[in-house]
Image: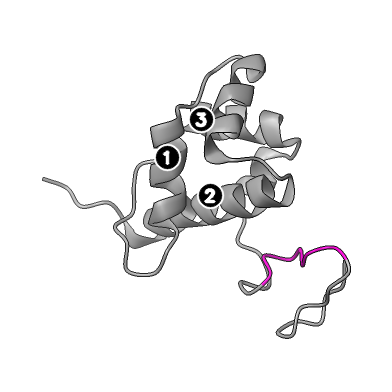
Amino acid sequence: MRQPRSDNLNVSRTVGANVRALRTKGGWSQRALAKNTEAAGKTVGFSTICRMEKASTPGAPAVAVYIDDVVSLAATLNVTVQQLITSPACLACMDSPPPGFACRTCGAEA
């Protein structure tokens, strides 16, 4: 059986991390995000979102991320697909510190 390339796994981890950061920034639970994907045309299930986000943690196994899910999540989170698949410059704050705070790692302010 063919093993996936490691850079593909990094993309799936990046998507999970970005989904988590954008979801929490928007104040949504994983269930609320799953429910809101219905309006985007393709429902992304709660368990799928959980697996994506869990895969972004260090040491967790990577998961397959389907492009249809990425498109639906991008539309729901009001970002581009490119924003979901691109690694942030700062992994500490995901390029978006909380409002009123500054990131100690990169110095970005919200």
Locate residue 98: give its quadrant. bottom right
Q: Amino acid at mark 2?
A: Val
Locate residue 6: give its quadrant. bottom left
Q: How many marks do you count on the picture?
A: 3
Q: Residue at x 45, y 58 (%)?
A: 56
Residue 2 part of the magenta-drawn span: no
Outermost residue, left side: 1
Residue 97 part of the magenta-drawn span: yes
The quarter in which the N terminus is drawn is: top left
Q: Position of residue 44 (x, y in %)?
A: 49, 26
Q: Residue at x 66, y 64 (%)?
A: 88
Q: Amino acid at mark 1?
A: Val
Q: Amino acid at mark 3?
A: Asp
The local secondary structure at tag 2 comes to: helix
The local secondary structure at tag 1 comes to: loop
Nearer-N-terminus badge (2/1): 2
Q: Position of residue 55 (x, y in %)?
A: 39, 54
The CA span between labels 3 and 2 is 10 Å
Residue pointed to by mark 1 = 65
The quarter in which the C terminus is drawn is: bottom right
Q: Give the residues in magenta.
A: 93-99
Residue pointed to by mark 2 = 15
Classified by dominant secondary structure, the portion drawn in magenta counts as: loop
Residue pointed to by mark 3 = 69
Q: Residues within 10 Å of mark 2 (few under 14, many from 20)?
A: many
Do the residues under discs 3 and 2 have CB atoms within 8 angstroms? no
The CA span between labels 1 and 3 is 7 Å
